Image (cartoon, coloured by chain):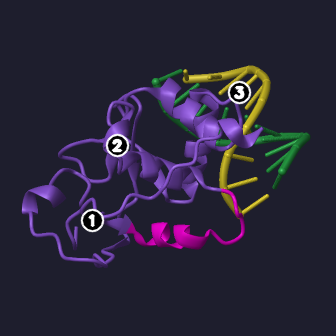
Chain colours: A purple, B green, C yellow
Amino acid sequence: RAAGCLSLSRPRGTGWLAFPAWACKAESSPGSRQIQLWHFILELLQKEEFRHVIAWQQGEYGEFVIKDPDEVARLWGRRKCKPQMNYDKLSRALRYYYNKRILHKTKGKRFTYRFNLSQLVFPPPPVSAPRTPTRVCTGTAVPAGG
DNA sequence: TGCGGAAAGA
DNA sequence: TCTTTCCGCA
């Protein structure tokens, strides 16, 4: 019955992303073997196909807007096999990240959150260095020493 | 729309 | 431990 579950694969060769240090442990999430919500959000954000659902807020590094809360909840529910998932429940999980300093809310902006970028790390591109500066300036990259 | 306590589930 | 579910409150 897991047939209906969405399985996202990691993109490759699509430029490079700057991830917070805490995001690096996502490769092998210790403690819980289940996918974590922040990682799922990060996955969605780095894919063009979900830009109508969730996207980085241009101009504000680390800030993202959930354009379609219902759809994000739907996708998350799919991944976790929780058909009853909705934005109310998803956002509660998001709120637990405040104290853990993974996320915080952008007050005044609807459906807008921000990743904690205090401890950024730049994983070096394994294949080849990005030659097109415009590629890293699409809002997915974050300036060092920010 | 957003917050956070409380309890339950995996 | 990280959610999921439920809910009163602002």
- Count neighbours of disc 3 (C-alpha within 10 A) and say few if under 14, some if 14 to 19, many if 20 or more: few
Provide the secondary structure element on which disc 3 rests. loop
**Going 35% across and 63% down the picture, which residue do you hit?**
A12
Q: Which image quarter holds the N terminus of chain A? A: top right
- How far apart are labels 3 and 2 at the CA level? 24 Å
- Marks 3 and 1: which is nearer the front? 1
**Going 70% across and 63% down the picture, which residue do you hit?**
A33
Going by the numbered disc 2, the residue's amino acid type is: Phe
Q: Position of residue A109 (x, y in %)?
A: 34, 31
Going by the numbered disc 3, the residue's amino acid type is: Gln
A34 left or right of A138? right
Relative to the observer, which residue lies in front, A120 or A105? A120
Chain identity of mark 2: A
Q: Position of residue A78 (x, y in %)?
A: 63, 37
Provide the secondary structure element on which disc 1 rests. loop
Whether marks 3 and 1 lie on the same chain = yes
User: Which segment is the magenta one?
Assistant: A20-34
On residue A16, the disc is: 1
**Going 47% across and 72% down the picture, which residue do you hit?**
A24
Whether marks 2 and 1 lie on the same chain = yes
Which residue is tagged 2? Answer: A64
Going by the numbered disc 1, the residue's amino acid type is: Trp
Relative to the observer, which residue lies in front, A136 or A59? A136
A68 left or right of A85? left
**Of callouts 2 and 1, which one flags the residue occurring earlier in the amino acid sequence?**
1
C7 left or right of A48? right
Which residue is tagged 3? Answer: A84
Chain identity of mark 1: A
Please, is residue A63 above or below residue A14 in the view? above
